[in-house]
Structure formats: structure tokens, C-alpha cells
Amino acid sequence: MKKITIYTTSTCPYCQMAKEYLKQEKLAYTEVDISKNPDKAQEMIQKSKQMGVPVLVIGKTIIVGFDKEAIKKALK
């Protein structure tokens, strides 16, 4: 199983959708709320080259936004 990290904010509806999808698929993940941790926000920007959330890191794959197909592909 690949490690899944999701960078979120508490006000992001797409973050909520992504987390719900991961829960439905019974996938364990680590959530990082960047609104509470500026260092982690910088880490996310360095990894994704984006400032928007959600950003999912699945293994070595970076997915910006909530994209079910990209998540499925990254988990293979």
C-alpha cells in the first residue's frame, strides 16, 4: 500500500470530497491542514508547485485537486 498524504484547509469543499472518497475506499491517509501550519504549506508548494488545495501525495505521485481517476491510477 502506498502512503497517502493530503494537504487541506478546513474551508475547502474539494478537500472534504477527497477525504470522503478516501474513506469510502477504506484508504488510510495522513491529513495536513496547511492553514494551521505555514511550514507544511511551504512544503506543499515545493512539492506541487501550486498554492491550491487539496494536494494529494500518493507514493511519489502528486495530484492537485480532487481527481478520482488520477487517485485510482496513482494507487496501482
Image (cartoon, rainbow, N blue to C red):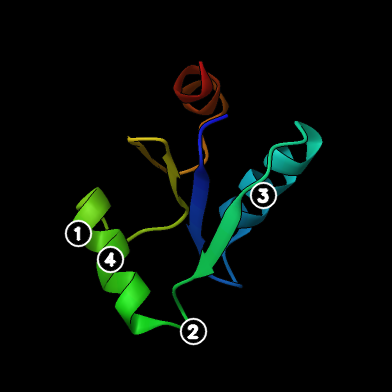
Inspect the image, locate mark 4, and give the three-letter code of the amino acid beneath it. Answer: Glu
Q: Which mark is residue 46?
A: 1
- Mark 4 lies on a secondary structure that is helix
Inspect the image, locate mark 1, and give the three-letter code of the amino acid beneath it. Answer: Gln
Q: Which mark is residue 19?
A: 3
Q: Residues within 10 Å of mark 4 (few under 14, many from 20)?
A: few
Residue sitting at 19 percent across and 52 percent down?
A: 49
Residue tagged by mark 4?
43
Task: Tell me which numbered mark, 2 or 4, is placed earlier along the sequence.
Answer: 2
Estimate the x, y position of residue 65 in percent, counting from the top left. 45, 44
Task: Tell me which numbered mark, 1 or 3, is placed earlier along the sequence.
Answer: 3
Q: Which mark is residue 36?
A: 2
Quadrant for the N terminus in the image? top right
Cβ atoms at labels 1 and 4 below 8 Å apart: yes
CA gap, disc 1 and disc 3: 22 Å
Estimate the x, y position of residue 24 in percent, counting from the top left. 80, 36
Q: Residues within 10 Å of mark 1 (few under 14, many from 20)?
A: few
Residue 13 left/right relative to 53 = right
Placement of 74 over or under 7, stated as above or below: above
